[in-house]
Image (tube, rainbow, N blue to C red):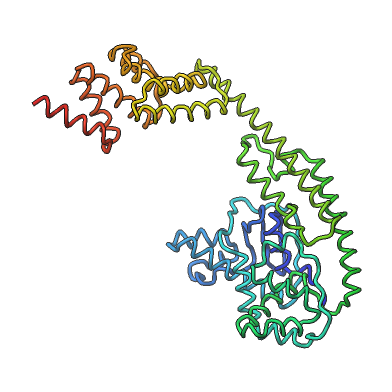
Amino acid sequence: MARNLSSPTALLMRALAGGQSGLLSFGDAQLFVKVGRIVQVKGLRLLDRWKDTLGDEADDLNAAVLTVVQDGAALQEVWDTAAQALGLVLARTSAGRVDGKWEAGIAAPAGAFPLEANLGKAIRDGYSVERPADTVAQRLGKSMDEPLSVAPLDPADRGLLSTGTMRTLKRCRKARTLAALLQEVAPEGPRVIERTWLDLDLLFELGVLELGKTAVEGKKRNRTLDERKVRSLLRRADKFEAMKPLTALGFKPKADLKVDAEILGSQFRKVAAPYHPDQFTEEGREVKQAAAHVFAVLNQHRDDMVKEARLLSAEVERLQAEGRGEVFVPKKLRDRARVLFRAATGLEDMRRWKECVEKLDEAIGFDPNEPMYKVVRLFVGVVLKEMTGSEAVRQMDLLTIEGLGAKIELHYRVGRLLRMDGNKKKALARFEQVLELNERHVGAAREVRLLRSRSK
């Protein structure tokens, strides 16, 4: 059985697993893929379920989805229906041995959006319906005693195969023929046999299995494949090295392009996944080394951009701080100050005032821009009689506080200081202000009840 590497199913599944972008054409159909996700389908009536609503729109997936959703259908239901229909179409097309054509880098039409569905499952389900186990068994039954050879698994295919399919592939490596394979799984029952036939169908479709090769021919072919893979991987490494880091990581240049360490990490994992060492555990030493080289090149690009992004972010923060008239504090020091502040509030709850002051002073030393550190420090200073409550309140009211939680905490602490100074009317106003911001604030509600009961 010859390998059919131009099968639309094989081409599409490799494009999805490899995070590729481009156009897959077969027959009158066009599937646009963007970074491993189908974003537009043309020439296939995927939504015949809503044909009365859609008319000709069913040939254009994005237009059809928008039309159906506007008519009241659930979006996820539409996506799932389209994915199931596409799985059936691919199974029929592959059964008829229609070749596909993959063109990398072809951009999708404007306004295209991803088909949010489990497409791998839809394709496998489509094969199960269009090419059921008994049909596969009948087709392959004539070749039960032919030599069975297993090609090295393409890294892009690995993520497409279920655990059960990978188990079947492992058994294929041990078995010399399909007859030997079926004899091994026979004791596990008819359901496992049926699942094995379906697994074999997909593995032949992806070109992983081949019939009619002797063991010696298979070894020669594998060595040739290894050499080709090494050359291909090294060419990719050279290509990535010649690119600018952002381009190599799959970013398109835009005037408003914004990247940070998290975005870079996510994009790196997507682009570098096909070259990760875990994808080459069954390959030869030379292939592993070549793949590791590609991975290292991409990793270096990522590291360079993360470093540059952090430096740029730090410079932007420094300029913003200067614009506000504040001292620039690096993120590492801000994080350290937050840890100290949490420790200080814990000590405050335990009424260990002096230790609390030490932590607060240390936190303010690391980050003098954070007003809440100063609010708590002033409050504890009054408790330790370093200043009067009225002086602390005056200084607190001069601070610029942002954020709802911080404003609530400020008013609550000011209210407590005013109550401690005997200014019950102003204290009550502050506690009521807290409840306006958060009607469930337990401390403020308790203070309001006490002050009102004592004023009667």
Q: Residue 371, image x and y in percent?
A: 42, 21
- Corner quadrant of residue 43: bottom right
User: Which residue is depicted at the point 85% across and 50% down?
Assistant: 234
Left or right of 396 on screen, residue 287: right
- Corner quadrant of residue 253: top right
Judge whether 10 appears above or below 425 on screen: below
Left or right of 4 on screen, residue 320: left
User: Which residue is depicted at the point 71% across and 37% down?
Assistant: 303
Residue 268 visible here? yes
Residue 375 visible here? no
Q: Residue 195, image x and y in percent?
A: 64, 78
Residue closest to the eye, 38 or 144: 144
Q: Residue 325, image x and y in percent?
A: 50, 15
Residue closest to the eye, 229 or 423: 423
Q: Residue furthest left?
A: 456
For the C terminus, the image quarter is top left
Judge whether 395 appears above or below 160 on screen: above
Q: Residue 419, image x and y in percent?
A: 22, 21
- Image mark count: 0
For the N terminus, the image quarter is bottom right
- Corner quadrant of residue 425: top left
User: Which residue is depicted at the point 75% across and 39% down?
Assistant: 300
User: Which residue is depicted at the point 24% across and 19% down?
Assistant: 418
